[in-house]
Amino acid sequence: MMDLSQCRVLAVDDTKLNLDILVNTLGKSHELAVALNGASALEMAAESPPDLILLDIMMPGMNGYEVLERLKRHPATAEVPVIMLSALSDVGTKARGFQLGAVDYLSKPFEVEELKARVRTHLLLARAQRDLRCQNERLEEMVRERTREVIQTQQATIESMAALAEYRDPETGQHIHRVKGYVTILAEELRTHPRFAGTLTRDFIELLGLSCPLHDIGKVGVPDHILLKPGPLSNEEFAEMRRHTEYGRDAILSVQRKLGAMPFLRMAEDIIFTHHEKWDGSGYPQGLAGEGIPLCGRIMALADVYDALISRRVYKPPFTHTKAAEIILQGAGTHFDPDIVEVFAEFSQAFRQVALFNSESDEQRENLAR
């Protein structure tokens, strides 16, 4: 049998004789405290919540119903089971107690064995519920810990995969860190826009930040003589370079076939395959237009172009922030979603700060200052 001797019971009754009966009946089996009025009972319960409360209904000043309502509103006592006590036995009296949160009802005068049995039953139930809550809390913590491990594994995998493209293309440098900052700024500020509010949930923004470093992973499939060519590309070479979107998409699809369609991989697939599409349909590889381009691809497109403009390439020096912002603004409605450009215009200084924090050279820093 479960030992309930350490369980604390609070008996509340304005009649000393009734409290004497409760003490004589329960005092040897449990830790019993008594209160002669509602105010004292509330103070005692809040200071040291008992395992069970026996509460008289008819008391002067604050009656049992009022006490019960306050107990259920207080965080420390809301879960404490309460058995109502009364000489009144009509259905309405009982029903009101149950509606307010009582777990049981005992009629006066008490039947000693019934009193003991009811008290024991509710103490056992309360302990079982407490144990179940503890188990649930432990399980929830295990799930949270496992989730953290999965997220850390995903992040490590993504950073490793993105680093492959970075190592192949020495020009990228801090590019993936900068664009992650850019897309986060855009997504956060677009959250309240009527067109995007339904899509840009917290989960979506988190996945966007997690997946965007993979946008150029397909460059690992581009031959060295094209990827590392120290000069302008021919038409044929540029056509091959454009295929990095397909190579990257195919790599992610291969991973999904083995691991399943994880949300961050699905997001990565869309970003990789559509971040070179243009709002007017003149982009690649599919020639998508307008809202036919996934939102993550539209956001990534602006972030990627801004960073390309402020970075040195074999065919151009880094542009100033002012010049890069001007080109982005000119691309509204042709290259970029005009509403995304509008947000960029308002928060372009935040882009500048991300770029400065992750800058790669004095030349780039000097140009970002202008």
Image: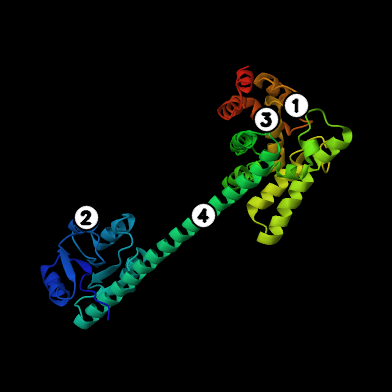
Q: What mark, if any, has residue 307 been given in the picture?
A: 3
Residue with the mark numbered 4: 149
Residue 237 seen in the figure: yes
First along the sequence among labels 3 and 2: 2
The residue under the point 88% across, 33% down is 235
First along the sequence among labels 4 and 2: 2
Vertical comparison of 179 with 254: above or below: above
* Element on which disc 4 rests: helix
Q: Is residue 365 left or right of residue 103?
A: right
Residue with the mark numbered 2: 47
Q: Nearer the viewer, mark 4 or mark 2?
A: 4
Dot 3: within a 10 Å radius of its alpha carbon, few (fewer than 14), some, or many (20 or more) residues? Answer: many
Using the numbered discs, state the Cα–Cα distance from disc 3 to disc 4 in whole angstroms.
31 Å
First along the sequence among labels 4 and 1: 4
Q: Looking at this view, is 340 or 254 the one in front?
A: 254
Dot 1: within a 10 Å radius of its alpha carbon, few (fewer than 14), some, or many (20 or more) residues? Answer: few
Using the numbered discs, state the Cα–Cα distance from disc 4 to disc 2 in whole angstroms.
39 Å
